[in-house]
Amino acid sequence: MDFSRQREVITEANRRQVNPWAPRFTVSKSADSVRNPAILFWACRGIELIFPKALVDIIMKAKVFVTLKPSVLDPQGKAIHQSVGTLGFHSVSDVRQGKYFEINFDSSVSETEARTAAEKMAKDVLANPVVEDFRVEIES
Amino acid sequence: MKFGVIVFPGSNCDHDAYHVISKHVGQPVDFIWHRDTDLSSYDAVIVPGGFSYGDYLRSGALARFSPVMKSLKEFAASGGFVFGICNGFQILCEAGLLPGALIRNKGLHFICKHVSLKVDNFETPFTNLVPKSKVLSIPIAHADGNYTCDDDTFRILEQNGQIVFRYCDADGNVTDEANPNGARSNIAGICNETRNVLGMMPHPERACEDLLGSSDGRDIFSSLAKSIESIK
């Protein structure tokens, strides 16, 4: 016997007892929409029709990699290199340490805008152009 | 004559600088909170040492965005004296008031000790009272004091006499052994082209009393006071 179904029927009966004018069928109430892919699909399409942007929105994420310029000495990288050598990784020829940032934008920002903004942030704040280079990747 | 000492969240040499100006230079001095923007009443502004903003991101990188920094740039552009010590030097470099950058010490350690300094240029407002043959003994206390810049900048610094202090041995010889942090050409302090902005890694404000091991720092502060007096 499907007990979950029975509980649902009882709840519906109770609800109608409290409010006789309540609509007989509700879409969101039933777990059917999760069980039945067709219902879920049409429910989503319905939401899409009412709020066209809701399912189309893509959130942009910028990944900024800041690295020391090749000409700049990296004592921390050197120390790490020595440590991984002690660990047994003797084939490592060099280690350079850098910084990594993830910047999330809200849904109003396009990919181009996200890239421009992240590059400006990297240039003005995240990296010091005297000693560091940076690279920006955009992920949606 | 009036001095100001900027206080950022994380500054910790502000009181030392204040003490030296009020006691040894004998001039009025104010603390300037980093959100204040009116510097019109000051003749010289000290950007003190410490760990502004916890040294997050890079030393001095976030202090650059404090409201006072915009005023400080205007203050420097109009000829006001700006003196950055240690973290203050890092902030001035990040803010573009001085060229180059200060990166992690070559040996990775935080170094806290007295070093010998050779004055490379006696014709600056910060060094004109230092006796010509004197090797200054002033302490350093930093992890990011390794001065670096590109070749073009270095050439300009040398040509213009903007290199003011170099690490040296007790006899005044600039050697690799005397370089505590790997700084390019043993650079310990530089000034801007117009000589009114100086940044240095050593702490002259910690070397103004014999009790503390050296009073050589007084030469620098007295020079600054005399320079202010002469233009007033």
Image: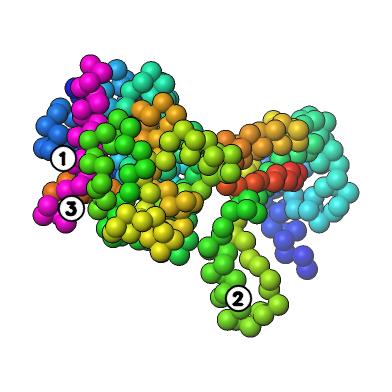
Residue type highlighted by circle 1: His
Location of mark 2 (residue): A84
Please report the residue visible at 60 percent of the width from the left and 71 percent of the height from the top: A81
Q: SS class of the residue under badge 2?
A: helix
Q: SS class of the residue under badge 3?
A: loop
Q: Is residue B132 above or below residue A69?
A: above
Q: Nearer the viewer, residue B114 or A121?
A: B114
As measured in the structure, the alpha-carbon distance from the residue carrying label 2 to the one carrying label 1 is 48 Å
As measured in the structure, the alpha-carbon distance from the residue carrying label 3 to the one carrying label 2 is 43 Å
**Mark before the other along the chain sequence, 3 or 1:** 1
Residue type highlighted by circle 3: Ser
Q: Which residues are magenta?
A: B210-232
Category of crowding for the residue at label 1, using alpha-carbon neighbours closer than 10 angstroms: few (below 14), some (14–19), many (at least 20) = some
Q: Nearer the viewer, residue A80 or B21?
A: B21
Q: Which mark is residue B19?
A: 1
Q: Position of residue B73 (x, y in %)?
A: 42, 25
Q: Farthest residue in the front direction?
A: B133
